[in-house]
Each structure stands twice: as structure tokens, then as C-alpha cells.
Image: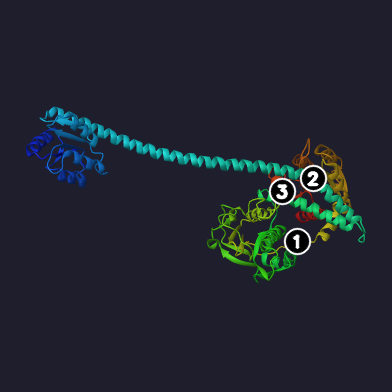
Amino acid sequence: MKNKQTILIIDDNSANLVFLGEYMKLWGFDFMVADNGESGLRKAGKGGDPDLILLDVFMPVMDGFEVCRLLKNNPSTADIPVIFLTANNDESDKVRGFETGAVDYITKPFHPKEVLARINRHLELRALQKQLEIQNAKMAMQNAQLENEIIERKKLEIKNLQLQKADSLGQMAGGIAHLFNNYLYTVSGNLELALEELPDDSLIRDNLTEAMKAARRCSDVSGAMLTYLGQSFIKTESLDIADFCRKHLPDFQSSVHKNIAIETDLSDTELIVSANANQMQQVLNHLITNASESIGENKGKISLSLTTRTIPASDISKLHIFPAGSNPSSNNYACLQINDTGCGISSEEIHKLFDPFFTTKFTGRGLGLAIVSGIVKSWGGCIGVRSKVGHGSTFMVFIPLSEDNSIRQSQKVGQVLEQLKSCSTVLLVDDNAAVLKMTTIMLKKMGFEVISAVNGVEAVELFRQHKESVSCLITDLSMPELDGWGTLAEIRKMKPDIPVILASGYDEAFAMSRIDSEKPQAFLHKPYTMNDLKNVLSQLVSLK
């Protein structure tokens, strides 16, 4: 790095070069000299890097105007200030000099002090210009960073807004599901009790059975959005996925068009995953239905294949992985693969596949794959998709292999009920009269005595009166005056070891999210069947 500023003097008069050179030394400048325009251009542009140029106007071959024009047209020398030197004081020449890019004009004979003053002034101006350029560059960089920050902030705001909307949607969906499921429980419960009383050959049995199925489907719909929103919490178990597929193959085959054959290639060894059997059936049903619809009613043999295989996380392609942002981290996965030879999916639509209600069919469809995405995500898995229009699709469901390879066998409900009957009396609490009546009838059919209360305050008082005989509490979650948690806490003060079942139309994850020292032994999600009630009561015996 140079310490002194350098002046380039271009003049065809050697006396002027000597004269000006001496003054450059006296004033403390480094300097270079050139006796013609071509030499001056070379020295200015080939590493000479002068800070200022003193340029004679009238020179042979190439005059100063042409030299200045060439300097200003060259990006490497364009910003070097040029001061013209001439004995000609013609105004038109001065104007021409400024038009070619000169910053100043000094007439001969020279006055040393004037030359020094003009040189210093233009060097200062150039230094200020460089500082301004540096500041402008910094400001441009800062502006770019600020723009990026604004863009990122807007993205974050949009994301936060989406999260807030999702949270609001989740609260709304949970509230609707709670009310909806309470009413639906009354419908399905009455249907179930009516079926229990009907003889097998009754003409209306089929009608009531279909109504019962429809009620259950309604319950599934209310839970579907909760599943997609991540509010569904269902207990998992060790499940052999290959064995599960074999057992349900007839169900899958009956759900597709008659021209479609389902071919399977299933692992002979156990592939144990931590999942829920009902949810697994939902995943398979939705994916097979989706594949079947993509094939349509085409004639000929069209096959679907189900394969299960072990695959390390590192081998899972990141291309078209759902849900978005999935980051496989397990050591090994079971891969449930479903191939079809249907119409395929375009690259524009493949990213929308798992959005709620996205469909290429008619309005009212499109929730199936969204449910699949929510369920697989809850298992810690992900879904890979490969597809090409006209060449079919492949859906790969990656589920982490369970570390626990044992399949647990639960105690038979019938055997447990015999133990439950010894419990005698159940305290049942619900602010919905229809629900209270329905559950009372179910419990009595199972052989229990029932004490019922319409709110928590009444329940506490009734328990105080019948503490010795009451051996189980079933309470609704949402009630006026004293809710299910408060009722549980008050009754546990009088009988700390009493088994408690908490019932709610809300999803279990939401209902059980409260941090409390007193916890129920089991949860019942409304609407539930008599068999569900039996199973939950069975858990209390196994926990005792």
C-alpha cells in the first residue's frame, strides 16, 4: 500500500516535465511523467494507479482532449481526476475540456501556489468521493440486509398468522367436536341399546344397524380434522405391520373396483412398529382408495402392491416427503409401499396432495390423505411420493421400527367384567341429562349399581353419603360450578385410591393436557359404545 499520493504528468515539453517534477518533490508527492498521450495512457492504466493527472492539451499525434476521452471511457481510469494544462486561454477549449471529463483547467505560465491549491482541492474531493462511495456501498449492503430482514420478518409474521389461525381453528374444532360428540353419543347410545333389546329376526334391525354405522362415521369426521391438526392422541401398541396387512387383505380387496387386483409382497419376518391398529387401517384404506380412484374403471388387470421393508433413515429421499419439514431421524423404518398404475399426479399438484379437502374429484372429497398425513406424523413417520402423469404413483409410508418387539396380549374383556361386578357401585357425573341416562342404562346392563349426579358439587355430596359403597367414579370433563378435574380432586381427598374415568367430547390430548397432581386412571372419548365402556372399565382392574 502506498503512503504518498501519486501525480501523473503528461506533457510533450520536457522543460515543463522537469519544472513540475521538481515542485512535486518539494510538495511531497510521488510522480510519474509521460512525454506523449500513448505513454500517459499506458502508465495510467497498467498498475500506475495515479491519484491525479496533469494533462497538456496540445500534443502531437494524440492531443489532451483525446487522451482525456480515452481515460474516461476506461473503467479502471475513469474516476481519476484530470486537470488540463495549456497556454491557450480560449473559452471554447475550456468548455471542450470540461465536456471530455476534466475537473479543472490551469493556464500557462504556471503559478506554483495555484497549481498546488488546485491539486490539493481535487485530491480532497476525490478522497471525499471515495469515502462517499464506501459509505454508499455500506448503506447498500445495510439496505439489502434490511430488505432481507423485512422479507424474513414478513415470512415469520405470515407463519405466525398461520399458526394463530391453526390454533384458533384447533380451538374451534375442539369445541365443536365436544358439543357434536355429546349429542352424537346420545344418538349412538340409544341405537345401541335399542339393538340390544331387539330380537335377531326383527325387521328394523338392519335399519338401526345402518343408522349406527352412520353415527360412527359422523364421529370419525369430527375426529378427522383434529387428527390433521395434530390434536388427536390415541394410544399406540406394538403392531406387526406385515401380519396386519395379511389379516385385512380381504377388506382391502372388497373396497376397490372389481377390475383391480391387489397383489401383496409382505415380509415373512416380524416388522414391529408402535402404532394404533384402527389408525393403521385408516391409513391403508385411504391410500388404497386413493390408488383405486386414480385407476378408475379401466378394463384389464391392474395391480396394487403392498410391500414392507426395513430401510435406514439416510436412504429416505427428501424428494416429495410429507408432511413438509419432515426430518427422518430413526435408525430404521418399516416401509409400507403402495403402487398403482393409475393416471399419476402432475408436479404442480403433488405438493397439494395432503392439504385438507384438496381433490381432483368432486367437491366434498379430499380429507383422506390429510388424515393419513396427521396419523403418520403422530407415529414419528413420514410419507414419500413418486408419481408421473400417465405412469402411476408410489406412496411410501415410513414408520419407525419399535424397540419393543413383543406383541402384548390384553386380558379378555369377559373375564375382567366378572371382576368388575364385585366393584358394585359406580358414581356417574354428567351435566347432560341424555348422556347421564344413556350411560346409567349401559352400566346397569353390565351389572353395576349406579349413583348419578348432574354436576360436580352434587357428586361430591353424594360421594360423601355413599363413600363406602362407591368403588369407581366416571365424570364428565366440562361442567358448571365444579368441572371433572375439580370433582376428581375433591373425591380423592375423601378416598385417595378410588379409580376414576374422565369422559369428554374433547380429544384426549386436549382433555388430559392439564397439569395436576391428581390424574384419572382412564379416559373415555365421546361418543363411545358399550364395548368401549367395558374396555375402559377393564383397564381399572388391570391397574389395581
Provide the residue designation for mark 3: 508
Closest to the observer: 173 or 431? 173
In terms of sequence position, does the residue under pointer 3 or pointer 1 come before the other?
1
Seen as rendered, the residue at the extreme left is 15
Q: Can residue 182 be seen in this view?
A: yes
Which label sits in the foreground, 1 or 2? 2
Closest to the observer: 200 or 534? 200
- Crowd around label 3: few <14 · some 14–19 · many ≥20 (10 Å): many
Rounded to the nearest angstrom, the CA distance separating label 1 from label 2 is 29 Å
Tag 3 and tag 1, C-beta contact below 8 Å: no
Provide the residue designation for mark 1: 410
* Amino acid type shown at disc 2: Asn
Q: Residue at x 57, y 65 (%)?
A: 311
| Element assignment for label 1 | loop
| Colour setting | rainbow
Closest to the observer: 280 or 482? 280
